[in-house]
Amino acid sequence: MDKLPKIALPAIFILIVLIILISKSAVTIGSGEAGVLYKTFGGGVVTDEPPLGEGFHIVAPWNKVFVYEVRQQEVFEKMQVLSSNGLEIKLDASAWFQPKREFLGKLHQEKGTDYVSRVLLPTIRSAARSVVGRYTPEQLYSSKRDAIQAEIYEETKKIVDGQYIQLNEVLVRDVTLPPTIKEAIERKLKQEQESLEYEFRLVTAEKEAQKVRIEAQGKADANRILSASLTDKILQDKGIDATLELSKSPNAKVVVVGSGDSGLPLILGNN
């Protein structure tokens, strides 16, 4: 019994040491994450092996694991840039991105965990200044926002692709112009719209007038053709036909053939 305390104390000490070692060696990587292993006595950052995947891992207590989120993330950036004529424009943009999983060790070794502020954001700012500087404030306000967004994405992607970052999309969320410039552009756009409406009314009126002229010309041509075709002989025949029809009426009448103008029958009588 006297020997039990002497055995128990070292056992408890060893158990405590083991618990500490296990707690230091156990690494849990969550969903959408990956781990970069750093070997203190084995050459530093491991770049020639895939990163540690999701789940529970045991590593030597003297080594470290740096955990990165590898699913798509979003970063926001507010910038002040200059248009082609030197006016200051405020631009709100965001980017969808994620680190390239297969190059996670290289990313950690060369850029570090703050790669977003070191690489991605400066590149977006540089691309935005370059792209916006090609356009006027009027183009930025109205018709060119989609083109600007696409160009910023392409210029940023070309750079960050070589920096182990996958860029999925760049979104231009807002373009803010100086108030005086914005008001001037809105007035100009309104005037252009009113001008287009006036031109439309003029075109419509001209088409309607042309339609009336065509209809009138058609009637005049028809009357001219009809007049040219009505000879005296035709008129006499028509008159005789009409007289014969009237003679069939039960009303009392006297028909004198050849007594009217142009030899047409003359009808005398009472109803």
Image: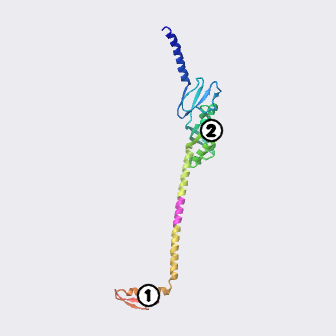
Where is residue 248 shown, x and y percent of the image?
Answer: 37, 87
Q: Which residues are magenta?
A: 198-208
List the residue tagged with mark 2. 123
Q: Quadrant of the C terminus?
A: bottom left
Q: Is residue 270 left or right of residue 222?
A: left
Q: CA distance from mark 2 to mark 1?
A: 101 Å
Helix, strand or loop: magenta stretch: helix
Q: Earlier in the sequence, mark 2 or mark 1?
A: 2
Where is residue 97 shown, x and y percent of the image?
Answer: 57, 38
Q: Among all residues in the image, which is located at the extreme top?
A: 2
- Secondary structure, mark 2, is helix
List the residue tagged with mark 1. 240
Of residues 12 and 149, which is closer to you in this image? Answer: 12
Q: Residue 90: which quarter of the image?
A: top right
Where 162 falls versus 64 (above or below)?
below
User: Residue at coordinates 49% horizontally, 87% vertically from top-left?
Assistant: 233
- Secondary structure, mark 1, is helix
Q: Is residue 110 left or right of residue 184?
A: right
User: Residue at coordinates 52% horizontally, 67% vertically from top-left?
Assistant: 209
User: Residue at coordinates 39% horizontally, 86% vertically from top-left?
Assistant: 246
Amino acid type indicated by mark 2: Thr
Of residues 117 and 5, which is closer to you in this image? Answer: 5
Where 219 falls versus 13 (above or below)?
below
